[in-house]
Image (cartoon, rainbow, N blue to C red):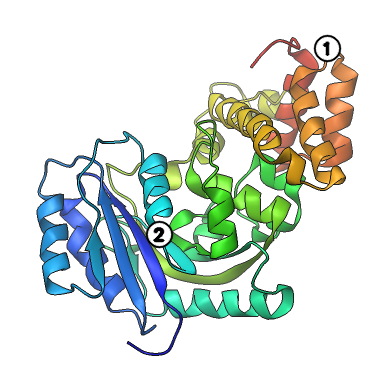
């Protein structure tokens, strides 16, 4: 190995044998010379574990499979166990069905180095990148995931906007040790590990979004989330109302409502878990976000949303949320 700092790739698997070898080969072929894989399987029955064991035998210094243990039942909790077992100063997350471009780790580490040169090594730091969306055979569907999903990485600098729409895709992320250690306090209310880590970096650390794709983000029939994330599904759903009615009377979709309620639960849990460590302004921001749901005054709910900037990307989504807050009962959600 070179004198470069070790980057540990945390690979969470579950019934991923179909695409797993291609992903593992892309990780082990990175142009960064000190990459090690730590893998954990969550109870696969399709040959995934056998593949992982083969790679552990072939690359004993670069690949380690955690001992079998009771399944967690979710990708988030699978990754959380990997995070607790990690010992590296820098970690990345890997999904089982993607393909990493050869400079994925080196590009992300370069962004991390720039963050450290500005903020130091004791600050929680996060670097993340764009992706290319591909089909099951790796044919490109969209050159930029961010453009396709209307993702603005600068939301990381606006915690109020980040709370309603996450911008970090876990398989592109690199964390330093201080951010990893903060993340280990992840509660059950956290929807996904990457959403929670994005909040931590925004509220308690620093981040850098690299506008270059480093991952081929494979879409297939068994994706856990993929490009079918709730908000995208709600934005693309075929409406039954006329165009004029939709524009004059925007209506919150099921997907947007699910995401709003997820965000509310996460904000409450975040305040409970990290409130004592936050600056007063960030505590106030979290309380304000909760007030958008809990206040019995419709004027307070809407005025709070507008004052603090809890905005989605797109006018129609924001109008729909304002209308929902105007009509809702304070005990909803």
Q: Residues within 10 Å of mark 2 (few under 14, many from 20)?
A: some
Helix, strand or loop at label 1? It is loop
Q: Quadrant of the N terminus?
A: bottom left
Q: Quadrant of the C terminus?
A: top right
Up-down relation of residue 56 to residue 112 (above or below):
above
Please report the residue visible at 62 percent of the width from the left and 28 percent of the height from the top. Answer: 265
Up-down relation of residue 319 to residue 67 (above or below):
above
Residue 10 badge: none
> Residue 73 appears at what percent x and percent y?
31, 33
Side of 271 relative to 134 (left or right): right
Helix, strand or loop at label 2? It is loop
Tag count in the figure?
A: 2
> Residue 266 appears at what percent x and percent y?
62, 34
Please report the residue visible at 58 percent of the width from the left and 70 percent of the height from the top. Answer: 211
> Residue 68 appears at what percent x and percent y?
20, 45
Which residue, as the protein is rendered here, is positioned at the far bottom? 2
The reply to whether residue 69 is visible in this rendering is: yes
Q: Residues within 10 Å of mark 1 (few under 14, many from 20)?
A: some
According to the picture, the residue beneath numbered tag 1 turns out to be 296
> Residue 200 appears at what percent x and percent y?
64, 50
Up-down relation of residue 208 to residue 232 (above or below):
below
Please report the residue visible at 55 percent of the width from the left and 24 percent of the height from the top. Answer: 254
Query: Which is more toward the observer, 228 or 141?
Result: 228
Residue 86 badge: 2
Q: CA distance from mark 2 to mark 1?
A: 45 Å
Q: Earlier in the sequence, mark 2 or mark 1?
A: 2
Q: Quadrant of residue 132?
A: bottom left
Please report the residue visible at 18 percent of the width from the left and 72 percent of the height from the top. Answer: 60
Check if mark 2's residue and mark 1's residue have beta carbons within 8 Å: no
């Amino acid at each position: 190995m070179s004198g470069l700092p070790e980057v540990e790739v945390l690979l969470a698997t579950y019934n991923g044998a179909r695409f797993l070898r291609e992903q593992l080969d892309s990780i082990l072929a990175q142009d960064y010379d000190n990459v090690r894989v730590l893998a954990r399987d969550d109870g696969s029955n399709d040959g995934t574990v056998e593949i992982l064991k083969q790679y552990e035998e072939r690359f004993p210094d670069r690949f380690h499979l955690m001992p079998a243990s009771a399944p967690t039942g979710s990708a988030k909790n699978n990754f959380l166990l990997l995070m607790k077992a990690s010992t590296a100063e820098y970690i990345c997350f890997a999904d089982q069905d993607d393909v990493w471009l050869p400079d994925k780790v080196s590009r992300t580490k370069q962004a991390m180095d720039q963050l450290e040169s500005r903020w130091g090594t004791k600050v929680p730091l996060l670097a993340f990148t764009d992706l290319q969306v591909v089909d099951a055979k790796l044919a490109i569907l969209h050159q930029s995931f961010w453009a396709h999903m209307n993702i603005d990485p600068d939301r990381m600098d606006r915690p109020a906007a980040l709370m309603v729409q996450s911008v970090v895709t876990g398989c592109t992320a690199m964390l330093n040790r201080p951010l990893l250690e903060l993340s280990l306090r992840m509660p059950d209310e956290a929807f996904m590990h990457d959403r929670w880590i994005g909040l931590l970096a925004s509220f308690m650390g620093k981040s850098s979004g690299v506008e270059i794709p480093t991952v081929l983000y494979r879409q297939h029939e068994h994706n856990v989330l993929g490009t079918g994330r709730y908000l995208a599904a709600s934005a693309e759903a075929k409406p039954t109302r006329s165009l004029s009615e939709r524009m004059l009377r925007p209506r919150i979709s099921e997907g947007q409502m699910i995401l709003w309620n997820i965000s509310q639960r996460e904000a409450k849990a975040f305040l409970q878990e990290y409130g004592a460590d936050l600056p007063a302004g960030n505590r106030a921001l979290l309380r304000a976000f909760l007030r958008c749901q809990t206040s019995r005054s419709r004027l307070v709910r809407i005025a709070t949303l507008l004052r603090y900037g809890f905005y989605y990307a797109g006018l129609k989504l924001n109008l729909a949320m304002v209308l929902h807050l105007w009509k809702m009962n304070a005990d909803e959600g």
